[in-house]
Image (cartoon, coloured by chain):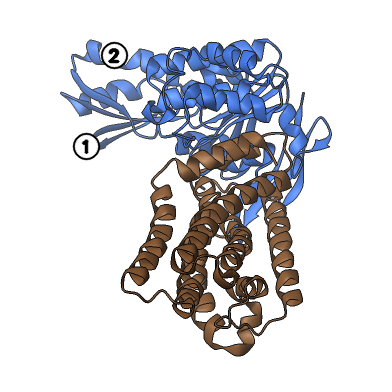
Chain colours: A brown, B blue
Amino acid sequence: MNGVIAGISYRSLLGRRRVWLLVLLPVVLLALAVLLRVIGADGERATVTLLQTFAIGTMLPLLGVIAGTGVIAPEIDDGTVIHLLSKPISRPVVAQTKFLVAASVVAAFAAVPTFAAAYLLVGLESGVASGFALAALVGGVAYAAVFMLLGVVTRHAVTIGIIYAVIWEGVVGNFVPGARRYSVQQWAQTVADQVSSSVFLTTDIGIGFAVSALVIVVVGAVFWAGRRLRSFSLTGDE
Amino acid sequence: MNIELAQVSRWYGNVVAVNDVTMTIGPGVTGLLGPNGAGKSTLLHMMAGFLAPSGGTVTLDGTRIWQNHEIYRSIGLVPEREAVYGFLTGWQFVLSSARLHRLPDPEGAARKALATVEMEDAASRRIETYSKGMRQRMKVAAALVHEPQVLLLDEPFNGMDPRQRMHMMDLIRTMGTAGKTILFSSHILEEVERVAQHIEVLVAGRHAASGDFREIRRRMTDRPHLFRVRSSDDRRLASALIADASSGTVSLTEAGLEVRAVDFRRFTWLLPRVARDAGVRIWQVSPADEDLESVFSYLINRSG
């Protein structure tokens, strides 16, 4: 972790228009929660469905794409990253710092609104709020790592990230039973299920598998991103 | 400190960008000269640790440069692309460089670097408000903040106005005199000539010439020059010109005379006198092959 790199990265991520993209999705989540409450559909079942499909299923991967790729891909694109890389700092440290910035941003913008939305609807009932907040936290950290890696390895990180979020996590991960074992949001929901006692939340992956998978993905992605940055190449105009 | 390149090549797929280059860049100012697309940036990126050589070795005093972040204690890099963190002020940008180097007194070092490039006044403004030349100077300040022994600059004069260019040239000369190893790339002969004591010429990825700038300049001006001349009486001028040994061939064309001058200096001295004596008015004299490509291809044919 390098404080100077973290400082610059937070400023570039939160100080620009990108922050509004980060704010937009949590605002939609809270608005939906308010709407459900107003129309009186604020039961535990509706809450769990909202959090599963929107908070974890939609908002979390998209925030992951925005923050994970946003923390490094634009800098690689326009060449500003050279300012950080032409310094006597090991490249894995640069990757770890970028990851920590992305992870903390996703966690803050996903976990807190998720807890707030759940609390608005069902209070602390059945541990739904804390379960899903924890799920958003760990899932957000995993997405931050995966999409940060994507931002390092490809110039099309945002496109690939959104396709992945929508196709794999949204469709395949939800409907193809075998693929569920390899979906970040399913691991996150497993964590939520572990904390919450709600009968409306059922998952079919073991908590041991989910936690190991999350750890492996995060460590592997950050490690690989560091390795790729070590070989970061400038290809000139020729 | 010396940067040594030994039989360095770099290819992208089937395209060879740099072909078997061996050179040593020592203290003083070296200009890396070549037309656009000659492989200057590729070579400079390999010296800066931002590209792996496909073959050969690039070392700094014997230490491998590629995948070695410790070299940045001794190397300062000014990349060609002007992008910098626009939301930072100049001061914050240079200070961040000093902090990333973990200098004992980052504020002091940043102040000194800003003074070196004379950017103290603009330092409190955001970089996104700067002109291209100001950004360039800010990048130089950030690259100088740790007082590196080696400074690499990729096309440093691009986009600068004449005054900024002059100032940057002075700065580079001063650092070279102080014994630092400085290399900058350029496709403009005059820039290189005014700043560098030593020139390395790269043409089509190959090391075409190396040496003192006077030597290279002489070789460039000694080549046969092709001029196009338009006058009030082309035929008369042609016969007067062909009488002198400095004009190799003279041909009469629709667009005027084409003169191949074998002795550049004598020809440029001769032409107005011959015209005056023959009572011919000259409308236009233009070099027909003065583009760098032809200069360089002449050089490479001579050295090859």
Query: Quadrant of residue B162 in the image?
Result: top left
Q: Estimate the x, y position of residue B250 in percent, counting from the top left.
A: 33, 31
Q: Estimate the x, y position of residue B104 in percent, counting from the top left.
A: 73, 18
Closer-to-camera residue (A68/B172) = A68
* Amino acid type, callout 1: Ala
- Classify the position of the C terminus of chain B by image quarter: top right
Residue at the spot 57% in from the left edge and 13% down from the top edge: B111
Residue bearing the label numbered 2? B272
Label number found at residue B102? none
Closer-to-camera residue (A87/B242) = A87
Total labels drawn: 2
* Amino acid type, callout 2: Pro
Q: Chain of mark 2?
A: B
| SS assignment at label 2 | helix
Binning the other alpha carbons within 10 Å of mark 2 as few (below 14), some (14 to 19) or many (20 upward) gives: some
Closer-to-camera residue (B257/B136) = B136
Query: Quadrant of residue B133 in the image?
Result: top left
